[in-house]
Image (spheres, rainbow, N blue to C red):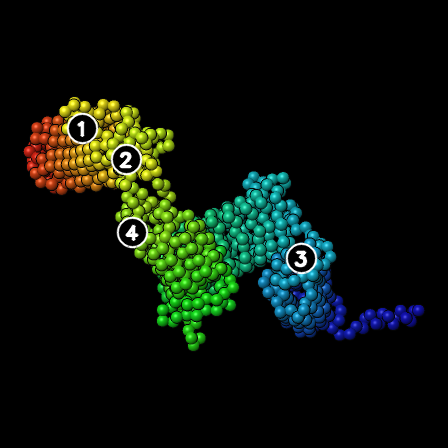
Amino acid sequence: MKKAMILLLVFLFVLPHGIGLASEGDFSFDPETGTITKYTGDASEVVIPAAIQGVPVRAIGQGAFNQNSALTRVTLPESVTHINTNAFYFCENLTELTLPQNLESIDPFAFFSCTGLKGLTIPAGVSFIGHNAFAFCSGLGSLTFLGECPLIEEKAFESGAEGRQITVPHEEQAAYEKALGTACLPGADCVYVNHQVPEEHLQFDAGTGAITGYQGTRAYALLPETVGGIPVTAISERAFFANPWLRRVALPQGTRTIGDSAFFGTPLAGISLPDGLGAIGQKAFQGTPMKAIALPGSLSELGESAFAYTSLQELRLPGGITKLPKEAFACCTDLETVYFPAALLEIGEKAFQGCSQLDYLVFDGQTPPAIASDAFAECPKIADIDIATDATKAQAQAFKEAFVAAGLAADSFTVWRANPADQPPYDTKARTTFDEASGILTSFETTSTEIAMFWNHWNKEQTATLDIHGIADGLFENSSITAFFVPHSEKFEHIGKRAFAGSALQKIHLFDSVKTIDDEAFADCRQLSTIALPPGINLGREVFKGCDGLSQLVLPADAVLSGDLGLPLDRIRVSKDASEEQRAALGRALGFPWHHPLLKEGEASAFLPMPDSFVPEPESDFEFEPATGTITKYLGTSPVVVIPRAIGGVTVKEIGFLSFSNLSLYTVAQGTESDTSLNQVIIPETVTQIADSAFLNCQALTRVDCFGPIERVGNRAFEDCAELEEIIFHNGVKSLDLYAFHLCKSLRQADLGQVIEALPEGAFTGCGFTGELVLSIPDIGKVAYKDNAQVTALHILPTVREIWEGAFLGMTNLKEVYFEAGDPNVLGDYRYQFDETSTGLKICLPESASDETLAAFITKMKQNGLPGEDIVIRKNCPSGH
């Protein structure tokens, strides 16, 4: 027995060369951090000690075993929590590896190209695996994860063994599959590890609620909501400054600010920021290797250099950011794409300087922010800038000019208006034909019902692409297509005749490159409910005939029309920015009647039909001529007459000659020429004509409400209606004839609407207007307001262009005449509009009127026989007139 013991001892102490517990002398060691910085031994199988110089080994430092081809087996002590970058890089003969249960992070390239590894178990506490950490471990056929899914950076396990089997906790299967981008097998129950930082590891200012320091060594720091019962509201400046252990941080929900340099220089790969965070200070994350960050929507303030020198690859700025300060993202050399919010107003000095991979910028807004001249200095790859889908060409040009002014070469980048978010993918399997001469697509065979049109097409030789300029006549006629998206190519201009006629089209997205839509292009597209037409569009005839589902069509102000669009007129509007001239021109082209003008988008029709509360008189009270729809005589005796819309089923269109007047040679002879019974008349909207003398000498008539859009009020139609006080044309009148209201001496109100262009001779001679009279009708005829003795003031609006002879004679109480436009030409020469005997009369011009204008009006008054110098003054019209 004793002999056997001796032999055993000999066996234990005479081990083969290269196998055994490594001595402390085999390692370069940083006792301050507990990090092995270099392995200097030559053993092939290494058991790393738990402590060196009495200090626990916490980390395998950067490149500690880099390219050690002798290494075949490594056992790490349970004290190790971090394996740093390149720690076992290209240890191609390493076949066996035992990771400690306390391990928390595995940094980028840590086991890159360790091709001898066959299987590996990742402990539950690992919260971070860096990019390329196990890339090109081509023999690694089995992976088992024990805990919840860590932060796994891209390419961490790239190019592994074919058919690799990955087993993960079944509760975390979906998270792992998303992180790894591959299918995983469900394994045992997840071992969850508590990453919350103990309060004693934190320095805390209870007065401000700010974490001011951290002494821990955790890779994943889940910070508490409260410290000592006080809510955490801030991360103070330099609180985690250059901490070498951090890889992930989750901030408490109550955090509102992150101070200057708070995480400066940490190896932070990921951070969870809370909703409600409002500000991030200067250099807060400068130098961190973060590749991605989700900035909360509440964030509104960034400090200078807040994310400079980080490894961000894509950046989405939240909607509350209005300014990017100096060097905010400078030297982020991995940054490729940035999304800017619509609210952004300013991009400061060197904000993206040195972002050498930056090539794609996306702006939600339609207006470029102010951009510092060096904001994108040393960004040579910027090629594409997207702006809002609905931005105009002018806005796209404004972005172009803004970036050229910021130092980008004009020919080095393109400003695109983004495709709609709901655009379908391009159908690469579609079979098409193309006319190279015209650029028109002539056939499109597909099984898809939603089509995003191509930008270009191969030539016949398949050697080059040519721009698609449009689609041929009838291309999708009677097809099952439901959606069509025009490319944002600036080249697509034309939609042919009946291109979509009779199809199942429900939605079409047009771009402002489209210039023409030919006849019946969308005829009988009964499911089409909306369409936005681009500016300057040229529309053919009956483009929308039979589009029953199209409840409203809005025409651009500068649209060009060939005729009827095929829609009921009440469904057509013009854009809000249309001028009155554009509105009128489009209305004429479409055949809108003057009393139903083309409305602007959002406007409701002002046309007022006769209210149903008015009960028409019996049809038997009227003589009626059905052939013309004319009432030729009122036979009734009611003092209030409501004219019916129809008599005998025929629409009433005209109030005929003398139809309500008793005046004739016979009645004069009998002394019954004055109708003394009729007091009020209500005329329905069907009536469009009031003939000569229709109400002549209706002495008791006091009020007329006309709902008809009247084309013409005839000669002397209401002459000598001595008691008439009010006449209201609710839907306007287009023209009056001579002396229409002559001698209506009680008339105080006459509302003619906005359409009438001229008052004829004698229109209101001898009427009873009192006080101020406001004139807007362009042409005021001869003696139009003669003998309106109770008028004391005239307010002549700028719409008035001509005032003819004697228009205001007999206005014996007239004291002030305000010419708002200050244009003497409205008075002509020697027209004697005013009484020579007027006393106290003042002709008032705007205070801004020039001396020349004043002199011109003085001349006009002298031509009226009035003392010009005495009566022409500068005086603005009183407010509210």
Q: Which residue is mark 3?
A: 173
Q: Which residue is mark 4?
A: 589
| Tag 1 near tag 3, CB within 8 Å | no
The kind of residue on which mark 4 rests is: Ala
Mark 1 or mark 3, which is nearer to you? 1
Circle 2 crowding by C-alpha within 10 Å: few under 14, some 14–19, many from 20: many
- Between disc 4 and disc 2, whose residue precedes? 4
- Between disc 4 and disc 3, whose residue precedes? 3
Mark 4 or mark 2, which is nearer to you? 2
Q: Secondary structure at mark 4?
A: helix
494 shown above or below 855? below
- Between disc 4 and disc 1, whose residue precedes? 4
| Tag 4 near tag 1, CB within 8 Å | no
The kind of residue on which mark 2 rests is: Phe
| Tag 4 near tag 3, CB within 8 Å | no
Circle 3 crowding by C-alpha within 10 Å: few under 14, some 14–19, many from 20: some
Q: Is residue 670 left or right of residue 282?
A: left
When asked about the image quadrant of residue 474, the answer is bottom left
Q: Which residue is mark 1?
A: 663
